[in-house]
Structure formats: C-alpha cells, structure tokens
C-alpha cells in the first residue's frame, strides 16, 4: 500500500478536483503492474496498473492494491470497479473509501456483490493524510488551506516598507527553502496573496524553480488599489480577483464582486464552487491573520531564518503546537496543523 501512496504522489498538482490515487497488482508476492492517476480527465490508477501488466491471464490469481476506493460511476472515464470485475480479480485491498457522492461506498459494494474479496482500511490514516486536500474539500465543502511565511529569528516577516519600496533585506529563508516553495506551488490548486503584498513585491506567483503547472492566482482587492501593470494581471495564468470595484482586464482574469460585508467564509464558498481544492496562502500578515482568526486554515508552514530585523512587521501567531520540524540548511521549517478541523 505504501507503494500505492508513492505512485499517487506523482499526481500532485495535476489531478485538479480529483483525488491522488495509486494502484499496484501483486502476483505471488511480486509486483507485476502499477499505475497512478496522472492528470484530471485521464485514465484512473487502476486502469493504468492493469494496462501495465504483460501477462493478463494472471489477474484472477493476483491482488489489486488501491489507495482509494475504485469508482463505480461513469464520469470522464468508465467505472474502475466494473473493469476490475471484468478482468477477473478475486481480491482487492483498499486504503480509504471515497466520500465523493457518486462513489461513497458504491465501488466497494459493487466489488463485493460481484463476489470479490475486499479488504478495506489498510494504512487508513496514511491514506487520509495523502488525500487530505481532496477529503477536506468534499467533507467540509471548502478548499484545504495551507499558510506559508518566513520569519526572522526575532519574529518579523518584513521591514516596514512603502508600496514599491524594494530596499532592505527581505529574503529571510535560504535558496533551498525558496526552491521548496516553488515545488509547493506546483502541488496546489491555487495561490493567494493580499493587496499589500502585490503593491510591495509585485510577485508573479508562478512556478519557476520547479517543474509543474502554475496554480490559479487569487487576491483580494476590495478598493481597486492594484495597478493594471501588476504581474498577476499579465493574463498568462488564470487569476481570480475579489473586488468591490468594476475593472476590465484582458486575458484569463475573472472578477468576483466582494462588497464590504464579504468575509473569508464567502471567499471559501466561491472557491469551492469553482472546484479549487487547495489554496496556498503566501501572505501578507493581514491575510494570514484573517485566516488564523477565522479558523479557516488547515496547515501552516513556517520558515525561521537566522537573520534579525529588530523591528518591522510582526510574524503571525499560531495557537497550536508544532506538529513537525525540519532543518533545511540554516533555516528551520515548522509545520502546524489546525487540530479543530
């Protein structure tokens, strides 16, 4: 099953609103086929695993391992549960059920009704962690939210700067950490920053130090403070702007009207409706604070460097114990998880 998880992770950032799924086929304790869900709309993991087997007559004597319940409905692809039956499998091992309404136990039931032995719950907690974005999106009807920031050893995320002021030491984390952030961007559905971050840094919010698709760019610009020349308006990547001002942009930019009463929970509902499964929030301090105070966050990744600012913009505060700590060069990475979600 852990091999299934390894395969499934290869689809991070590519499956969009679909879960991460890996599958292997074992005959006499030897893997004879394996596959994973490569991209949204493409063949499922079970299909790819079955296609990879060079000796199909072995299927009835083999066990299919799958990280998530095989589907039982006609979507963009035919039902995997029906294919498993047709190929003659007698035993299937599954980590987690799929809570998607069109599946949600129906795939398991189909296999059992077909006389196939099904073992459910293998490494269940690890399977849930693998698909925490998808499971959260389906169960809570909002995107899985990951907060990220870098802070100095004395607890600041930036110097006090005016919009457009590029002076002063701002890179707190090291080169390896910055590359890791681009990898993270490639793994999530969307990336979000606040208006002040765009005014100060004019980020492109794209994947550059890693191979992968650019996430959907999101920002809040209630009062129309952002210039049309900002990089996020270059039209090259899908961008969503929550604003209370009517604007006209060229390219792949969508406006969502947000009046003064529009709150973060409303933003989450809109993103759910747009099938945004996960959001990577990179700042700034005001936006992070909004997520932390509303409780609408699920994971926080905090870099702490050795640099000292002595004054500036204070880092956000999290009322959770550190779940995991990793040393990256001279930078420390602390991972927090919202225990209330």
Image: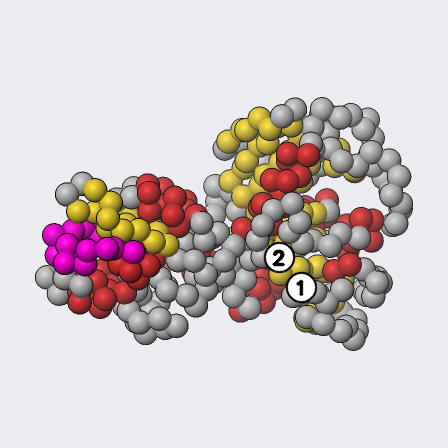
Between residue 28 and residue 226, name the one nearer to us.
28
Picture coordinates of residue 325, whole percent (x, y): 54, 29
Q: Residues within 10 Å of mark 2 (few under 14, many from 20)?
A: many
Q: Residues within 10 Å of mark 1 (few under 14, many from 20)?
A: some
Answer whether labels 1 and 2 touch (C-beta < 8 Å): yes
Magenta segment: 52-66
Q: Pick whichever of labels 1 and 2 is earlier in the sequence.
A: 2
Name the residue: 44% across, 49% down: 10
Name the residue: 43% across, 58% down: 38
- State the separation of the CA atoms marked 1 and 2: 7 Å
Between residue 206 and residue 225, name the one nearer to us.
206
Residue 284 falls left or right of residue 91: right
Secondary structure at badge 2 equals: loop
Between residue 80 and residue 60, name the one nearer to us.
60
Picture coordinates of residue 328, whole percent (x, y): 60, 28
Which residue is farthest front? Answer: 54
* Residue carrying label 1: 237
Q: Quadrant of residue 234?
A: bottom right
Look at the picture and state if 113 lies above or below 118.
below
Q: Quadrant of residue 154?
A: top right
* Residue carrying label 2: 214
Look at the picture and state if 263 lies above or below 252.
above
Name the residue: 33% across, 47% down: 4
Look at the picture and state if 120 lies above or below 180.
below
Can you see residue 36? yes
Of the 4 image quadrants, the one containing the N terminus is top left
């Amino acid at each position: 099953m852990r091999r299934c998880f390894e395969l499934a992770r290869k689809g991070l950032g590519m499956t969009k609103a679909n879960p991460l799924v890996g599958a292997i086929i074992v005959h006499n304790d030897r893997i004879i086929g394996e596959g994973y869900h490569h991209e949204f709309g493409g063949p499922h993991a079970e299909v790819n695993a079955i296609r990879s087997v060079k000796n199909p007559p072995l299927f009835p004597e083999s066990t299919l391992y799958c990280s998530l319940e095989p589907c039982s409905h006609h979507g963009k692809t035919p039902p995997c549960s029906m294919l498993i039956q047709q190929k003659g499998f007698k035993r299937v091992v599954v980590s987690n059920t799929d809570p998607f309404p069109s599946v949600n136990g129906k795939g398991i039931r189909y296999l059992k009704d077909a006389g196939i032995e099904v073992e459910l719950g293998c490494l269940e907690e690890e399977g849930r962690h693998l698909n925490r974005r998808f499971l959260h999106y389906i169960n809570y009807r909002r995107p899985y939210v990951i907060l990220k920031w870098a802070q100095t050893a004395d607890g600041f995320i930036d110097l006090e700067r005016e919009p457009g002021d590029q002076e002063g030491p701002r890179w707190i984390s090291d080169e390896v950490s910055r590359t890791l952030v681009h990898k993270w961007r490639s793994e999530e559905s969307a990336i979000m920053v606040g208006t002040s971050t765009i005014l100060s840094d004019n980020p492109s919010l794209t994947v550059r130090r890693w191979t992968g698709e650019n996430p959907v760019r999101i920002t809040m610009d209630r009062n129309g403070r952002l210039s049309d020349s900002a990089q996020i308006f270059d039209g090259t990547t899908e961008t969503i702007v929550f604003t209370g001002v009517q604007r006209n942009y060229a390219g792949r930019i969508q406006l969502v009207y947000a009046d003064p009463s529009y709150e973060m929970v409303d933003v989450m509902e809109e993103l759910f409706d747009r099938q945004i499964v996960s959001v990577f929030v990179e700042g700034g301090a005001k936006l992070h604070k909004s997520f932390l105070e509303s409780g609408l966050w699920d994971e926080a990744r905090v870099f702490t460097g050795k640099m000292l600012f002595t004054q500036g913009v204070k880092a956000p505060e999290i009322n959770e114990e550190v779940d995991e700590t990793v040393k990256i060069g001279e930078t420390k990475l602390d991972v927090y998880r919202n225990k209330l979600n």
